[in-house]
Image: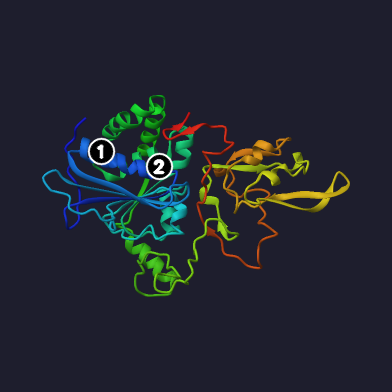
Amino acid sequence: MQETATLPVTNEYGYFEIRLESIGGLGANLCGKMLGELGALYLSLNSLSFSSYGSEKRGSPVKAYIRWCAASQPLRINSPVTHPHILGIFHEGLISTYPVLDGISSDTKIIINTPLKASEAARKYNITVGTLYCLDALSIAMQSKSRINMVMLGAIAKASGFIPIETVETLCRETIGKKYPALIEANLDGVRQGFQMTESISFSESAQTHDKQNASAHGGGAAASQLAKEKYVWGYENAPVGGINTRPGSTVSNDLSPSREGYIPLFIQDKCINCGLCDSTCPDMVFQFAPGVYKGKQAMVNQGLDYYHCKGCLRCVDVCPTNALVKALEKDYPKKPWFIPNQDLLPDSITYQETGSNSYITSDSYLDEKRIDGGVV
C-alpha cells in the first residue's frame, strides 16, 4: 500500500523528526527501524533511521532517531534528533532519571507509556507545551500478547495525524509477519489498540493556565514554563579521576522498579513456612528475614520484600514449596503488601535512583511465558 504523505510540519531544514526514548528490551530499536521503512517504502518520503545505545542488555538507555522529508529533497543530516516533532517515551521511569524531555516545543507530539491519564502525567512531569498522548502500553501488550513497541507504534501513528493505520498494519505484516507468522495477529492487535486507546491533551489553549500555576507554585509572578531537567553533579570538566562510575548498575541506592515487566512476586504470609528458599535463590537480597517466633519456636521469620531491589525475575515464585509467593500483576498492587526496605544495608537516610538494570528476564527466567523477539508464544 503506497501512500504519498504530506508532512504537516518541518524544521528549518525541511525535515520531520522523531525521537524514541527507551530502555533495552522494550523494542525501541526495532520500532525506529520500522518507522524508517514506513517513511521510505509506504509514505513516499526520503527516510533515515538509526539508534544510539551502550551495552546491548535489558535496562540500558536506548534512543532511536528517525528523519523524514519530501522525496524531492535530499537528507543531508545524520546527527541525533534534538528537537523532535514526535517524542516517544517507552518507559516513564526515564523522565525522572534522564533529560528525555529536552528539545520539545509547541509542535511536539509527546507519547508516554504510562497508566496515568494525560492530565495527571502533564502535572506530574511538568509538561506545558506541545500535545501529550498517554496510554498504558505495558498493559495493552500483556493483554494482546504483543510487545510494547508494537503498541507504541500504533500510538505514534495516531499522534502523527497523517500516518494511516492501514499502512502501519501492512508494514507489520511485511516485517514481523514474515519473520514470526504465528505472532502477527497478536502484534496487529497491539498496534490497533495502541492507535485506539491513546488519550491526548493539548496545551495550545491551556498553556497560560499551567504556566500561571507553575509560577504560583514557585513563588514567581512570571510564567514558569521551563521544563524540569536533570542537572548532573559531575561532568567532563569536574568528574573525579580514576575511572569512577557515577551510575553503577547495582547498588543499594538503586530502585530497580523500572526493570520489572508487569509482574511482581506477591507474598502470602499465612502460607509461609520460613524455609528460606526464596532468600537463597534471590539474586538481589530482596527478602527480609529477622529473628521471630514460628509455631511457638524461635526462628528466622520472613518479614517481607524489598521491592526497591526486586527486578521481577520471579525465581522466588518458582522455588516456593507452599505457594506463599505467587506471580501477580504489578498494576493491581499500587501499594504493595509486605513491602519493607532492606534492613541490613540501608544507611540512616537514602535517596533512591530509578535504574533499569535487568539483563536476564528473558534469557534466564522462570516466567511461564516463552518470549521471543516477536512477542509471547
SS under mark 1: helix
- How dense is the environment of label 2, judged by Cα within 10 Å: few (below 14), some, or many (20 and up)? some
Residue 136 in the image: state x and y as whole percent: 45, 43
**Side of 69 relative to 351 (left or right):** left
- The label shown at residue 233 is none
SS under mark 2: loop
Mark 2 or mark 1, earlier in chain:
2
**Side of 287 relative to 166 (left or right):** right
- The label shown at residue 27 is 2
Q: Are marks 2 and 1 in contact (CB under 8 Å)?
A: no
217, 258: nearer the viewer: 258
- How dense is the environment of label 1, judged by Cα within 10 Å: few (below 14), some, or many (20 and up)? many
As drawn, 340 above or below 244:
above
Residue 99 in the image: state x and y as whole percent: 39, 60
- The label shown at residue 38 is 1
Write the residue at 14% across / 43% down.
Answer: 71
Write the residue at 67% across / 54% down.
Answer: 340
131, 300: nearer the viewer: 300
As drawn, 90 above or below 102:
above
**Side of 243 relative to 210 (left or right):** right
Q: Amino acid at mark 2?
A: Gly
Q: Quadrant of the N terminus?
A: top left
